[in-house]
Every structure is written in C-alpha cells, then in structure tokens.
Amino acid sequence: MELLDKTTENGGIRINKYLSQAGVLSRRKADEALMNGEITINGRTAVPGDKVLLNDKICYRGKEVSVSTRKKVILAYNKPLGLVCTSKEADKDSIFRKLDYPEMLYYVGRLDKNSYGLLLLTNDGELANQIQKAHNNHEKEYVVKVNKPITKSFVEGLIKGVPLEERTTKPCKIIRVRTEEGYDRYTFRIIITEGINHQIRRMCEYFDYKVVSLKRIRVMNIKLGNLALGQYRELTEQEEATLRRLTKG
C-alpha cells in the first residue's frame, strides 16, 4: 500500500485509490461516487483524477474518511433470502441495514435477492479488487436445486460452458449431491471461476431448467460451514493469511 506520508513526494495518490485503501469503496465504486458528486476534498466536490495529499480532508457522503487509522476487517456473512447487496442506506432490504456492523464495509461479489449463503464483507478495497478480478479465476461454490430431474446432458452442458449474451461461460465443475438413497435428482454443487450477472440461473435456463434454490457455500478458501443464517464472523488469522496469499497469485 502506498503510504500517505509519502504523498507530498510524489504529488499525491488518486482519490479512487485513496478511498479503496481506506476501505470505504472499491475503485470502481469510488469512480461512480465521484461522478455522482458524493466525494469532497477540503470541502470541494472531487472529480475523477483528483489526487490526495497528506493533510487533505476527504469526505464521502459528508463523513470524513482516513486510511491511516482504519483496521482491515474481513467478515464471512450468511446472507438470508430477501436481502439486497446494495450500499444505499435508504433501501430497507440492504444487507448493511440488517447487519448493523459499526464499520463501513462493502460486499465482495454480490448475491442476488433470491440467493443466500456466504458473502464476504470487507473494508479492504485492494483485497476486494483482487478477489473480484475475473482473470484471477478464483473459485466460488454453490448448492443448486432445480425444478426437474437432472440429466447427464444437462450436467455435461454446464461443465462444457454455456453461451450467454456476454460470452460463453468458462468450463466449470459439477458435483452430484448424495443422499442415503443415492444421488439427489434435483440438487447439485457447482464450482465457477467467474461472476457474470445471474450466471448460474441463466446457465440453467439455457437448458430449460429453473433454479429453485441457490446457496453459496464457499469463496476461494473461505467456507460457510455451520454459520447461522443472518450471522457473521471475522475470518481466522489462518483464513485471512491464506486468502491474501491466494489473491497475490
């Protein structure tokens, strides 16, 4: 991380990078906030490309932010159904209104309103950016229940890759779920390495399947485990160390 006490030597750091390091916003979200006039530098509305110096006062939506005193936090949260991944405080269904955590956080890889399970939350913008970069091929694992019996051709089609509007999905892994009677006819686990919008639902729809239930159980090395619905926990030191090592390639 670029130290703020050296910014006077190099002319400062860009405002979006500063906000990312402060754990307030990812760089992409910071750029959006800049375009919306939500960020000020010493009382002046900031614009994209502005730089921050050591003694500058930076505010986001009227609240002062600082990179020097902020502890890095990474949470594993079991998101319930019906909640939305949004930072808009006015949205009554926002995960952050229900979470009621004292630090300002943002989510890493959204879960839609009708999905539930593991969601990583952090104030470490640089880490979040690395996790979400598609070319890093970081694994995410889900349990999927569909509306009709699973066929061999359906599984093979998912594994191979599905043509969506944006692009054909990367090959993925499918794991059948076993019960006492054998394989569950409607449920499987899927491991993907990209994050196209509503990807799993759309992959299934391509083969005329409808997703009845979608639960995320793992992001990289972080597992949902037995974390209760609606609850969160901080990562262990070992989990965080491994996560940071994996994001560095």
Image (tube, rainbow, N blue to C red):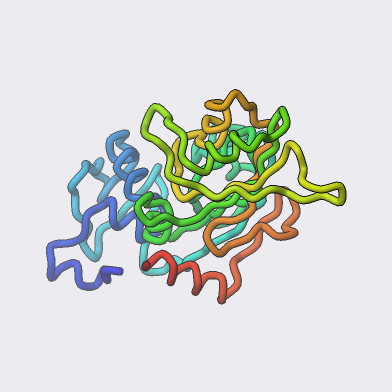
Side of 6 relative to 138 (left or right): left
**Quadrant of residue 37 in the image?**
top left
**Quadrant of residue 91 in the image?**
top right
Residue at the limit of the structure toward the top, as seen here: 208
Q: Foreground: 216 or 163? A: 163
Considering only vertical position in the picture, is 206 above or below 9?
above
Q: Let me know if residue 155 appears in the view.
A: yes
Considering only vertical position in the picture, is 193 above or below 144?
below
Q: Foreground: 201 or 32? A: 201
Side of 101 relative to 135 (left or right): right
Residue at the limit of the structure toward the right, as seen here: 180
Considering only vertical position in the picture, is 33 above or below 175?
above
Residue 220 horizontal/vertical position (percent): 52, 60
Residue 231 horizontal/vertical position (percent): 70, 54
Q: Foreground: 95 or 208? A: 208
Q: Foreground: 172 or 7? A: 172
**Quadrant of residue 165 in the image?**
top left
Side of 82 relative to 5 (left or right): right
Quadrant where the N terminus lies? bottom left
Residue 224 horizontal/vertical position (percent): 66, 57
Side of 161 relative to 191 (left or right): left
Q: Residue at coordinates 32% horizontally, 34% vertically from top-left? A: 36
Quadrant where the C terminus lies? bottom left
Q: Residue at coordinates 59% horizontally, 48% vertically from top-left? A: 174
Q: Residue at coordinates 28% horizontally, 51% vertically from top-left? A: 16
Q: How many marks?
A: 0
Q: Let me know if residue 65 appears in the view.
A: no
Q: Residue at coordinates 63% horizontally, 60% vertically from top-left? A: 223
Residue 166 horizontal/vertical position (percent): 37, 31
